[in-house]
Image: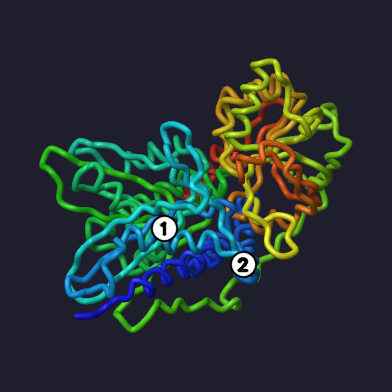
Amino acid sequence: MSIIRQQDFIDSIEDALQFISYYHPLDYVKAVEKAYHKEESQAAKDAMAQILINSRMSAEGRRPLCQDTGIVTCFVKVGMGVQWDKTDLTVQEMVDEGTRRAYLNPDNPLRASIVADPAGTRKNTRDNTPSVVHLDMVKGDKVEVMTAAKGGGSENKSKMVMLNPSDDIADWVVKTLPTMGAGWCPPGMLGIGIGGTAEKAAVLAKESLMDPVDIHELIERGPETTEEKLRVDIFNKVNALGIGAQGLGGLTTVVDVKVMSLPTHAASKPVAMIPNCAATRHAHFTLDGSGPANLKAPKLEDWPEVTWEVGADTRRVNLNTITKEDIQDWKVGETVLLSGKMLTGRDAAHKRIQTMLQNGEGLPDGVDLTNKFIYYVGPVDAVGDEVVGPAGPTTATRMDKFTDIMLEETGLIGMIGKAERGTATVESIAKHKSVYLMAVGGAAYLVSKAIKNAKVVAFEDLGMEAIYEFDVEDMPVTVAVDSTGANAHQTGPAIWKAKIEELDAALKA
């Protein structure tokens, strides 16, 4: 029997959440490095270079890998022989207290993204609580914790299905994955939960993502169990789709596939698929009564020395003088370096602007979108001499419903976000002769270094969803949809799927 102090548990949760905000698991870093050196698609290689550079910068600066510092999920396994020193707090309340302290840490504040009343007012709780806690009672006298911070972009792409017992799981995954777009920020991992009941399959999928990347070791020794064979089958088939890093087309879409299963009803085959993004964040620790967890910081020399240089043909753009005519010759796939002033805006800001325009009120004071670009971002609060905290892009498709009115009525000529746009939005972009630019998801700290000044200009009450004015210098983006409607997220994967098929055919010949 061991006595676990509540304070040790709370301190360990706080430390773990701070730790994973800026330290990638090294197994993931090494997996992306391997994919980077293997990659033949320049767009995908550039994206992975930015992810790896951002990872090292975050580790050095101890600042978040991604501006979306996630919803906290904890798997807590309490030994039957454990006693707590006090009984005034539940495990849920202890996890929430650790979360609250971690996210309000003045040295490295993390973005509060949790909203209460999700079907109604969706008011931000301001401290990222409550967390999601999965509690199990197990044998022994220790407390084992696996904690993760899951971004909304990848969580929103989760899929669940009740297959027939004779249906093929890998076929369902291969059919479903392309419908998820690139908002989950590949290259990442897929967690597959099978069996139990519908809700249990989803928990299994989430828990499987806590395991380290080891697919290449598995392939080398050869899969033996049903789960191992399924992992390898899905891994090969998904990467053969050619989706690639950030959905731009390439050889690596996933760096690993995890599978957990449980017995299920004879008439059922529940399957859940949950992706982990390029900001893979999780930590594991065990408490035995001797004190709080001691998380060992990785060594900076363990990160690869990867550089990213802009090409000679990179287009440099002055946002302060640009006009709609200037963007007409931009071509899909081009790298563009942006300098000058842009405005930001996410879901809540777009909804308010839509309401104001529909009511004939016009734009809010301080907001002029004529010949401007809007960046879909909700930054982390600044610390020290920072002008803004990590400020990577959010998933652009969430703004699709607002795009037509924004292009029609505000003078906006371009948007910057993460991943693809919907078909109707691409048509609207072509109709209005505007452009959509893509910044790399999972490179938030790197992007923030291009922001030289930042100030809130409207909707301050929305917190991280307020409208900011950013003054940027050489912010790297890719033309994802040009003024003709050409779409990199359609052409890139199609080209690379065909190339992969040719490579496979050549190897088999």
Residue at far front of view = 88
- Report the residue at 38% width, 75% height from top: 8
Q: Which residue is mark 1?
A: 256
Secondary structure category for the residue under label 2: loop
**CA separation, marks 1 and 2?**
33 Å
* Residue 52 percent across, percent down from the top left: 60, 62
Q: Is residue 124 left or right of residue 80?
A: right
Q: Is residue 177 above or below residue 329?
A: below
Q: Which disc is residue 474 wearing?
A: none
Task: Check disc 1 and give the amino acid type.
Answer: Asp
- Specify which label sits upstream in the sequence, 1 or 2: 2
Task: Check disc 2 and give the amino acid type.
Answer: Asp
* Residue 62 percent across, percent down from the top left: 61, 68
Q: Nearer the viewer, residue 425 or 130?
A: 130
Mark 1 burial class by Cα count in 10 Å: few <14, some 14-19, many 20+: many
Mark 2 burial class by Cα count in 10 Å: few <14, some 14-19, many 20+: few
Q: Nearer the viewer, residue 458 or 506?
A: 458
Q: Which residue is mark 2?
A: 107
Viewer can see residue 497: no
- Report the residue at 42% width, 59% height from top: 148
Q: Quadrant of the N terminus?
A: bottom left
